[in-house]
Structure formats: structure tokens, C-alpha cells
Image (tube, helix red, strand yellow):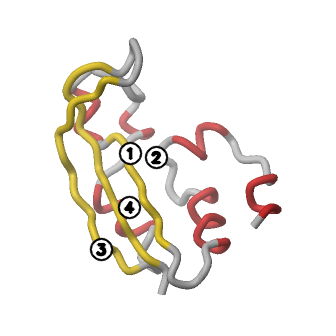
Amino acid sequence: MKEFWNKPYSVKEYIYGKSPNSFFKDSLDSMSQQGKLILEVFSKNQLHVGTGGPKDSGMLYSAETLEKDFQSLKIETLKESTIMLDEGDLHQGEACVIRMIAQKT
């Protein structure tokens, strides 16, 4: 596991919606059996909200993309929601996010 976290990744690949995402793939490879992944990302709908996150739709996610990227896991929760952000000056107000909980089986 230590080797995984010491491996360099492109910041854009690590954070943003590039697919296939080698950070995601390597994360899955390093997860232990029955391990859980808890993920919150900005959805593509965030582009029109303006309360934070990337301004490029190619750097945002859809539920369908996450479902595809994590098809090897048992997805327990995959939900797009509007939430209230209060996370510093650049992330304030309503935001469109996708939350996922998945387990490696």
C-alpha cells in the first residue's frame, strides 16, 4: 500500500474527471478485499452553478462515468445531490455533487 501512495500522479488525473483514470485504477488494485471506497466529486451539473470546482466539463463527473470506472466494485450508494458548501472563499453556496460508497468484493 505504501508504494501506491508514493507513486506520482498528474494532479489533473488525480482530482478531475479524466476517464479512464489511472489513479482510480491503481486505487482499486491496492484496496483490500471488502475494503470500502467513499467518494464525493463535483458533477457535470456544477458547471452551471458557479460555486466552486472546475470550469471545464471534461474535469467533472457523471454518475454513469463513475459507475463505469468502478464497475468492479459493488456500488452501495451512487447519488447526485445538491448540497450547501461552506469550504473556504472559493467553495460557498449550493453545489452539485455525486456521492458514492462502494465495496471491493
User: How would you rate the neighbour count of disc 3 (Cα within 10 Å): few for under 14, some for 14-19, many for 20 or more?
Assistant: few
- Numbered disc 4: secondary structure: helix
Mark seen at residue 28: none
Residue 104 image point, x, y percent: 49, 80
Q: Sequence order check: which comes first, mark 2 or mark 4?
A: 2
Spatial CA span between label 3 and label 1:
16 Å
Spatial CA span between label 3 and label 4:
13 Å
- Numbered disc 1: secondary structure: strand
Asked if residue 60 is positioned above or below residue 23 in the image, the reply reads above
User: How would you rate the neighbour count of disc 4 (Cα within 10 Å): few for under 14, some for 14-19, many for 20 or more?
Assistant: many
Does the residue at mark 4 contact the one at mark 1 (Cβ under 8 Å)?
yes
Q: Name the residue under label 1.
A: 41
The kind of residue tagged 1 is Val
Spatial CA span between label 3 and label 2:
21 Å
Q: Name the residue under label 3.
A: 76
Q: Name the residue under label 2.
A: 17
Q: Sequence order check: which comes first, mark 4 or mark 1?
A: 1
Q: Quadrant of residue 77?
A: bottom left
Q: Mark 4 points at which residue?
A: 66
Q: Nearer the viewer, mark 3 or mark 4?
A: 3
User: How would you rate the neighbour count of disc 1 (Cα within 10 Å): few for under 14, some for 14-19, many for 20 or more?
Assistant: many
- Numbered disc 3: secondary structure: strand
- Numbered disc 2: secondary structure: loop
Q: Which of marks 3 and 1 is in front?
A: 3
Residue 26 image point, x, y percent: 66, 65
Spatial CA span between label 2 and label 4:
9 Å
Camera-side residue of 94 and 14: 94
Quarter occupied by the N terminus: bottom right
Spatial CA span between label 4 and label 1:
10 Å
Asked if residue 63 is positioned above or below residue 97 in the image, the reply reads below
User: How would you rate the neighbour count of disc 2 (Cα within 10 Å): few for under 14, some for 14-19, many for 20 or more?
Assistant: many
